[in-house]
Image (tube, coloured by chain):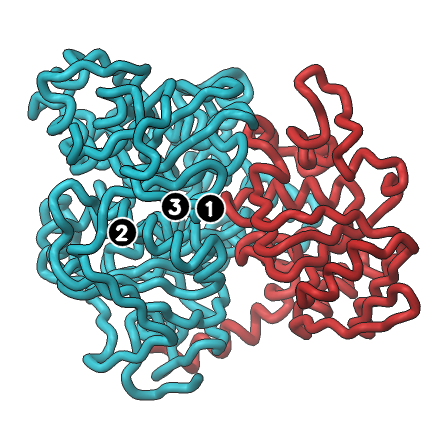
Amino acid sequence: MRRILNVNITEKLLAKAGGKPSVAPGDIVFANVDKVMIHDVSGPGVIKVFDKLKKEGTVNVEKLWNPSMVWVAEDHFVPSAEKISAENVMKLSKFTKQYGIEKHFKYGMGQYGICHTLSHEEALVLPGEIYVGGDSHTNTTGALGAFACGLGHTDVAYVLLNGKIWFKVPETLYFKLNGKLPENVMAKDFILKIIGDIGNDGAAYAAMQFGGSGVSEMSVESRLTLCNMTTEAGAKNGIVEPDQKLFDYLASRGAGSYTPVYGDKDAQYDKVYEYEASELEPLVAKPYSPENIAVVRDVSGVELDKSYIGSCTGAKYEDLEAVAKILKGRKVKIRTEILPAAISIYKRAMENGLLKIFLDAGVTVGPPTCGACCGAHMGVLAKDEVCISTTNRNFPGRMGHVESQTYLSSPLVAAASAVTGKITDPRDL
Amino acid sequence: MEKFSKVSSTAIPLDRANIDTDQIVPKQFLKLVQRTGFGKFLFHDWRFDQGGQQKPDFVLNDPKYSNSHILVTGENFGCGSSREHAAWALKDYGLDVIIAPSFADIFYNNCFKNGILPIQIPRNIIGELMHTVSKIEVDLEHQTIKYDSKIIQFAIDDGRKKTLLEGLDDIAVTLQYQEKIALYEKSHTL
């Protein structure tokens, strides 16, 4: 469908980056990229692509397009889970030194954490930008009013060398939330509801845009949760229009200047879905798919072995605050782990007394890492172990043994369930 | 990359939807970055039991398919993590063609970077291919699949078809146009 007027934000961003007056879904743009991210899994993969190109001798890989547009995170297998992970981290250090990349967030050296969390905690991506990363959840950062999407290693290598890449302009699905979310219902519940409705591939190669009064009311961190899980519906990108709340958030994190991009006032969308906030309630995604949604009260009583509060999806500061609200003065009945998603969040949790609440409740607090979310380390699941988790995927074996079971939930539900040992609606605690 | 030509073999029927890249290559192998040798990790947790023995009921372990170069599977193949290791493993195992009703976006792109042809065709034809016991032939040049004396056409982007047919590297292809791109850039400054 071609449209010249009433262009939405994703189309505006891609048109600007491609140097075109306007674009429509299906158009191909060769877009200038503003920011690139690699981490300890995609980084070594990219380095491998560089090595291959160097060996073939066809492409000059001696210098990057612009080292200052790149940042490097250590998150999946750190602190080094074993020897090979340690070697991968060393490879990253060598790579950043060789190419003059200054923004390398190393564990054990101040701020570090999950790549998507750093993107907002450190204001590494700004409104109006095009941002790509070697990780599928790069979509998260679209909540900052940027076009953000994940790429494979070869594509990331290409962007590092050329500063641009082509995109097919996606169609846009618009999710409008009317009214403020009720107490005890979080952004996670809203995005789970959407994935349940449209399915794992319901947004395949589409943009998912979130708006309406409910999204305006939401904190920036809640919007990040929405965009984060657009990946689970197959979306190319997730996005929220920038507003004053976002500008304040970025200013508090030392953001420099930027030019926000907005959709036209009467922007058009390929499909509009409307939700009433007052009708939403706590949900879980049952094993083994994020689209396998159930109302918490319909599965309450499912016996659990563990509660896991971590990841780019569910261990931002606001997520930890929600957990602390539940755990304050209570004890956990099952193994519970909390892994703040970045050192800056860890520190705020300490300064504001959250860590004490967690430790008093019996929780193990771990270092920032993707950890068990991707089944890497730091509490992976055994055969038949049943876990409630604030993470983003529950495919077979995602968090450990292929016969373990993960229920995805909001931080409030994961905390309430930790207290009772069974899947629990926070309203019933 | 090797030039892609016709592929003729039996097709492995893996009738599941939403196969994510963690099923294709489980996370424990992500730390390894050699591009070759990933074939042994392909569908690892489905192919092998905890003792490392082959599970006889998993289709890849059926001797009938030991020389297959084609995988026929369900919707949304390759969803989940963006790991390019998934494409490396499929290729290294010997699979050159993946046929499915739909693919996840990042995985679909990664296929072309690694000499794999992903073909998207309607579900009803997938059903027929899954029940075809004889060889099927995939011809990229003519964009056809021949099976059981039938011929069907499939669609593919021209640029990507050329890349596979000529065995070109995506990065190398674009860099052939480096001068033209630079000229264009000069004349189109924002």
State the CA–CA distance, disc 2 to disc 1.
Answer: 26 Å
Circle 1 chain:
A
Quick check: can you spot residue A330?
A: yes
- Residue A190 is marked as 2
Drawn colour of chain B? Answer: red
Residue at image coords 23%, 36%: A316
Give the residue type that dot 3 points to.
Answer: Ile
Residue closest to the eye, A92 or B22? B22
Question: Which label sits in the foreground, 2 or 3?
Answer: 3
Q: Secondary structure at mark 3?
A: strand
Drawn colour of chain A? Answer: cyan
Residue B180 location in percent, x, y?
56, 76
Residue A215 location in percent, x, y?
18, 58
Does residue B104 appear to the left or right of B152 in the view shown? left
Residue closest to the eye, A424 or A184? A424
State the CA–CA distance, disc 3 to disc 1.
Answer: 28 Å
Quick check: can you spot residue A103?
A: no
